[in-house]
Image (cartoon, helix red, strand yellow):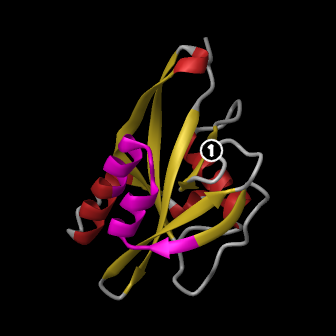
Amino acid sequence: MSTKKLIDLYPYRLEGDEIKFLLFKRAKGKIYEGQWRMVGGKVKPNESSWQAALRELKEETGLKPEKLWTIPSINSFYEVSTDTIHHIPAFAAELNSDIEPDLDDEHVSFEWVTLNDALKRIRWPEQKRLLKLTHILLSTDQILEDWLVSADFY
């Protein structure tokens, strides 16, 4: 049975009153080839989940967030190949609206999209649910102070 720890990260930017999510198209030969995804990855030994989220954002985009916060829910699913139930913490990262990502070799393209466009592209039901929750929390200004990762850490 697998013991890998994973994270999900939903990058977004604010364009006036509109929230745009950053999605990436996976490269040929990579896991989830051809799928539109958000940032995700494995937690390294001696690394917290929020540290992994920051590292993965940097590795996959070259960007540093303006704000990083934990989404008060998790992505849960069963992985057949490893007979593992995963409980993945989810984070959201607000990015500067003037800066574009510098893609790594895991992705072939990126797009800033509205919630509706993101929901059409993302295939995983739990990730769709977390996108909706993130959008609700942002659009109703309900992000609690307790969910924020201190900017002192990044």
Furthest residue in direction top, as rendered: 1
Instruction: Tell me the kind of residue under disc 1.
Output: Tyr
Residue 133 locus on image (x, y percent): 28, 54
The quadrant the C terminus occupies is bottom right
The quadrant the N terminus occupies is top right
Who is closer to the viewer here, 132 or 27?
27
In the image, is residue 40 above or below residue 3? Answer: below
Q: Residue at x 67, y 52 (%)?
A: 55
Q: Residue at x 75, y 52 (%)?
A: 28
In the image, is residue 60 above or below residue 41? Answer: below
Write down the residue under mark 1: 32
Q: Residues within 10 Å of mark 1 (few under 14, many from 20)?
A: few
Residue 35 locus on image (x, y percent): 58, 52
Left or right: where 125 falls relative to 26: left
Left or right: where 132 falls relative to 81: left
Label 1: which secondary element: loop
Left or right: where 44 falls relative to 69: right
Toward which corner of the image does residue 89 lie, by quadrant? top left
Toward which corner of the image does residue 60 lie, by quadrant? bottom right
Question: In the image, is residue 98 part of the stretch drawn in magenta?
Answer: no
Residue 13 locus on image (x, y percent): 46, 75
Q: Disc count in the image?
A: 1
Q: Residue at x 29, y 60 (%)?
A: 143
Furthest residue in direction left, as rendered: 140
Q: Which residues are magenta?
A: 111-131
Q: Residue at x 73, y 72 (%)?
A: 102
